[in-house]
Image (tube, grey):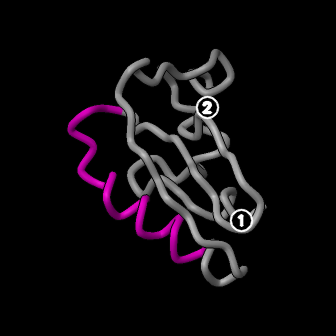
Amino acid sequence: DVIKKVEDPELGIDIWSLGLIYDIKGEENLDIVMTFTSPMCPYGLQMVDDLKSKLKEENYEANVEIVLNPMWEPTEDLRDMLGI
């Protein structure tokens, strides 16, 4: 639920629904693997900071690893939402 509160500022959709979170391990100390909508995402670091901050508010610590392989691909539902 915490991750769903972090939005991509450019798209206005949360990073969970966008499918930017690839993996989460741990219970209180989390290892999160995520990606961005593009390698040059201007809001990437802001989203990582927002994610860590919101998790910290709920007493979680997070190590966030950014990966660009595989590249993010929007689902059909997201394509419809985004009009692409």
Above or below, 49 relative to 41: below
Q: Secondary structure at mark 1?
A: loop
Residue at the (24%, 51%) spot, across then down: 42
The first of marks 2 and 1 along the sequence is 1
Of 27 and 66, nearer the camera is 27
Q: Which residue is mark 1?
A: 2
Inspect the magenta stretch and tell me whether residue 20 lies in it. Answer: no
Inspect the magenta stretch and tell me whether residue 48 lies in it. Answer: yes
Task: Specify the principal SS of the magenta part.
Answer: helix
Give the x, y percent position of residue 77.
Answer: 68, 22
Residue at the (59%, 33%) spot, across then down: 22
Picture disc at residue 81: 2
Which residues are the magenta region?
A: 38-54
Instruction: Tell me which amino acid carries mark 1.
Output: Val
Image quadrant assignment for residue 59: bottom right
Give the x, y percent position of residue 44.
Answer: 33, 52
